[in-house]
């Protein structure tokens, strides 16, 4: 894993989108298509906006998988990640094939069905973020680092649910679903390349916990340090609690 620190969220997003666009073009050139995983949330908006403006991507040759989704939330709800992805990525660029997680029906059946499609062959590049509690996708601490299931139905902890209120997706915590469908940690790590976008001071504590502590299920995104081709994009705010020696080591080392 390597980390890159930028002055602000805007420059971070442009740089991350440049790497993401290059990974997609490279996969299409090599194999005729690109398989990607897309993340959602407030931290990903500027990144996805920059990515959709990138030139030279044959989006019709892209197959997209959904990182996570709430159980029981209709696509019409402002917090729906299916709605988010359609509006901010799929419909903007015309992605050729996509697999969205519909949590309004049988969540277990959806996890199995989309998981079977996902595990058919390797993902070229996965876009992820880090939650305020250190979560990776909706794998809250203590995360399951062992399961090989592509998707899990998980219970969301209070810190995760409060983050969703803080970002303005829900009016109060009583409205936030208690369960979600989430891509598993081991499935995320199977991607050839991982691009992790983490702006904002409210992520600083989680960033420190994941990159200065031990690799641990209690800091789920710490597992990214074990991936040989993961890049974490930070801004000065999200990196502000990291020691200079940590930033230096993460900026120069490719492996965790």
Image (cartoon, rainbow, N blue to C red):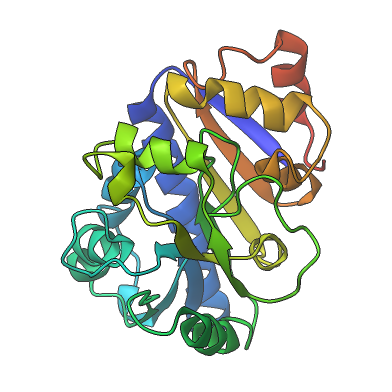
**184 left or right of 110?**
right
**1 left or right of 64?**
right
State whether residue 55 is above or below residue 11.
Answer: below
User: In which quadrant is the N terminus drawn?
Assistant: top right
State whether residue 194 is above or below residue 236.
Answer: below
Any part of residue 123 in sight: no
Q: Residue at x 47, y 16 (%)?
A: 237
State whether residue 109 is above or below residue 210.
Answer: below
State whether residue 92 is above or below residue 60.
Answer: above
The image shows residue 117 at horizontal and vertical percentages of: 54, 88
Q: Residue furthest front?
A: 174
Q: Residue at x 19, y 69 (%)?
A: 91
The image shows residue 107 at horizontal and vertical percentages of: 46, 79
Name the image quarter holding residue 209: top right
**31 left or right of 202?**
right
**207 left or right of 254?**
left
Considering depth in this image, is 77 or 120 the residue closer to the camera? 77
The image shows residue 131 at horizontal and vertical percentages of: 51, 39
The image shows residue 79 at horizontal and vertical percentages of: 26, 54
User: In which quadrant is the C terminus drawn?
Assistant: top right
Any part of residue 98 in sight: yes
How many dots with numbers?
0
Q: Residue at x 28, y 50 (%)?
A: 175
Q: Residue at x 37, y 79 (%)?
A: 98
Name the image quarter holding residue 149: bottom right
Name the image quarter holding residue 88: bottom left
């Amino acid at each position: 894993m390597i980390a890159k620190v930028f002055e602000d969220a805007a420059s971070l997003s442009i740089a991350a989108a440049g790497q993401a666009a290059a990974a997609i073009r490279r996969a299409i050139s090599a194999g005729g298509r690109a398989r990607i995983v897309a993340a959602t949330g407030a931290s990903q908006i500027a990144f996805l906006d920059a990515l959709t403006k990138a030139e030279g991507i044959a989006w019709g040759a892209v197959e997209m998988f959904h990182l996570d989704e709430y159980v029981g939330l209709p696509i019409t709800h402002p917090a729906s990640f299916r709605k988010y992805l359609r509006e901010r990525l799929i419909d903007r660029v015309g992605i050729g094939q996509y697999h969205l997680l519909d949590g309004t029906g049988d969540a277990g059946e959806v996890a199995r069905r989309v998981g079977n499609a996902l595990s058919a062959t390797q993902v070229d590049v996965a876009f992820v973020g880090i939650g305020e509690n250190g979560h990776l996708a909706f794998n809250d601490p203590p995360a399951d680092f062992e399961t090989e299931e592509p998707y899990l139905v998980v219970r969301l902890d209070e810190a995760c649910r409060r983050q969703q209120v803080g970002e303005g997706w829900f009016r109060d915590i009583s409205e936030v679903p208690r369960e979600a469908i989430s891509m598993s940690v081991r499935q995320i790590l199977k991607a050839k390349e991982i691009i992790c976008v983490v702006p904002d001071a409210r992520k600083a504590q989680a960033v420190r916990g994941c990159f200065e502590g031990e690799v641990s299920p209690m800091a789920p995104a710490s597992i990214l340090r074990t991936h040989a081709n993961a890049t974490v994009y930070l801004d000065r705010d999200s990196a502000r609690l990291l020691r200079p020696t940590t930033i230096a080591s993460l900026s120069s080392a490719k492996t965790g």
